[in-house]
Image (tube, grey):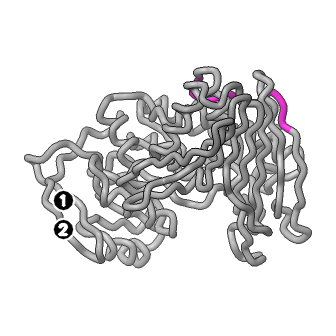
């Protein structure tokens, strides 16, 4: 079973430019987070938690005490552990954020759930749907929450997009186009280019436009998401490592909606979202990393009457929104986080499996177990 709530104070302590609440028995209940791994994305999420309303940083675990202590210098008052096992054994940790490379997600998500910790796992949740099933089963067996960390799902811009689609502002949606790609120099030692590390564009960033297309396809019919009935694709694999340099896919949904998605490591793309309906279209310049803070998020609605700018005020940071959405679900006794449910993650992984199968991309780790269908 999941650990009971800790009670931190509202008093703030500052170190390294970040403030966060420290434990005190008289304060409102908040979620105690443990950070598993200490890379760049772990620091980004930790900064979000340190600013969040419903959670605080309790501990960090790394494969070395030196790395854990270096990480902890940026944040006040957190405990350090020299192994992931020690972090999971910490009774003061209720929820674990897993920030390891993709191939290690399934092991540590399963072990965290078995330890009674709620699990927020960085995307993609696993290499394939089979791994996602294992994580979901472990969470269900231990009565803890599992969420795949698509932080954009918790931003109010995404909620506004869903609201407009459901309200029929665009009429019937016929086409969605979205890309996410960047131009990274080739480095065989980098996880991005490594087959052993499940590198390539589809898993690293292609998971975003696939998840958005499924989200909006569902919104059109009043459902939380919709899975495609057909996935076709093409791509270019790197001649040395075999990971995808660039890949594109077409998703066909049961409503007739078609989505065109693309991902890349080897070329920069515009990383936008376009949604075309019978009454108008939406152009979203930053669908996956929308603006936060003083500058509002902006996207554009074009109809017969012209183009209108839609602004969305987002006072929190992306990872702050995500941490608070997760903590609220725990506090409310929910079985999962509404912004990204287990069923949604299973459908997303299944679609990514089919996209990779279409271009012939299989990882070495999968050859030992089960390749994507």
Q: Position of residue 330 (x, y in %)?
A: 34, 36
Q: Position of residue 117 (x, y in %)?
A: 39, 43
Residues packed near mark 1 inside 10 Å, few (<14), some (14 to 19) or many (20 plus): some
Indicate whether 1 appears above or below 198.
above
Q: Nearer the viewer, residue 45 or 253?
A: 253
Q: Nearer the viewer, residue 310 or 77?
A: 310
Number of the label disc, if any, that sits on residue 13: 2
Q: Position of residue 331 (x, y in %)?
A: 29, 35
Quick check: can you spot residue 131? no
**What kind of element bears circle 2?**
strand
Q: Quadrant of the C terminus?
A: top right
**What kind of element bears circle 1?**
strand
Q: Nearer the viewer, residue 328 or 353?
A: 328
Please name the residue shown 80% across and 36% down the image.
251
Magenta stretch, main secondary structure class: loop
Give the number of marks: 2
Quick check: can you spot residue 48? yes
Q: Name the residue at the left extreme.
A: 26
Please name the residue shown 57% across and 26% down the image.
166
Q: CA distance from mark 2 to mark 1?
A: 7 Å
Earlier in the chain: of badge 2 and badge 1, it is 2
Q: Are marks 2 and 1 in contact (CB under 8 Å)?
A: yes
Magenta highlight range: 223-231
Left or right, 240 with respect to 288, comes to right
Instruction: Identify the residue under disc 1.
Output: 22
Left or right, 231 with respect to 93, comes to right
> Which quadrant of the structure image shows residue 164?
top right
Q: Position of residue 142 (x, y in %)?
A: 43, 32
Residues packed near mark 2 inside 10 Å, few (<14), some (14 to 19) or many (20 plus): some
Q: Quadrant of the N terminus?
A: top left
């Amino acid at each position: 079973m999941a650990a009971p709530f800790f009670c931190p104070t509202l008093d703030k302590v500052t170190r390294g430019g970040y403030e966060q609440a420290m434990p005190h028995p008289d304060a409102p209940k908040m979620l105690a987070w443990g950070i598993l791994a200490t890379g760049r994305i772990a620091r980004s999420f930790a900064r979000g938690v340190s600013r969040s309303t419903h959670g605080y940083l309790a501990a960090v675990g790394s494969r070395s005490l030196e790395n854990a202590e270096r990480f902890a210098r940026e944040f006040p008052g957190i405990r350090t552990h020299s192994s992931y096992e020690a972090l999971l054994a910490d009774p003061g940790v209720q929820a674990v954020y897993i920030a390891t490379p993709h191939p290690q997600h399934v092991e540590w998500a399963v072990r965290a759930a078995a330890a009674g910790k709620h699990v927020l796992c960085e995307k993609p949740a696993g290499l394939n749907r089979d791994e996602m099933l294992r994580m979901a089963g472990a969470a269900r067996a231990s009565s803890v929450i599992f969420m795949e960390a698509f932080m954009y799902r918790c931003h109010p811009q995404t909620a506004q997009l869903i609201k407009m689609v459901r309200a029929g502002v665009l009429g019937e949606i016929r086409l969605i186009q979205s890309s996410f790609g960047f131009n990274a120099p080739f480095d065989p030692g980098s996880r991005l280019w490594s087959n052993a590390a499940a590198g390539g564009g589809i898993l690293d960033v292609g998971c975003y436009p696939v998840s958005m297309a499924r989200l909006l396809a569902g919104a059109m019919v009043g459902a939380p998401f919709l899975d495609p009935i057909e996935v076709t694709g093409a791509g270019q694999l790197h001649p040395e490592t075999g990971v995808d340099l660039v890949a594109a896919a077409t998703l066909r949904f049961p409503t007739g909606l078609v989505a065109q998605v693309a991902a890349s490591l080897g070329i920069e793309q515009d990383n936008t979202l376009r949604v075309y309906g019978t009454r108008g279209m939406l152009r979203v310049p930053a669908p996956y990393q929308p603006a936060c803070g003083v500058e509002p998020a902006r996207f554009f609605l074009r109809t017969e009457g012209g183009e209108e700018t839609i602004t969305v005020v987002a006072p929190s940071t992306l990872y702050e929104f995500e941490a608070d959405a997760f903590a609220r679900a725990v506090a409310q006794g929910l079985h999962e986080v509404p912004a990204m449910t287990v069923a949604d993650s299973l459908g997303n992984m299944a679609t990514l499996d089919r996209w990779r199968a279409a271009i012939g991309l299989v990882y070495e780790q999968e050859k030992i177990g089960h390749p994507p269908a």
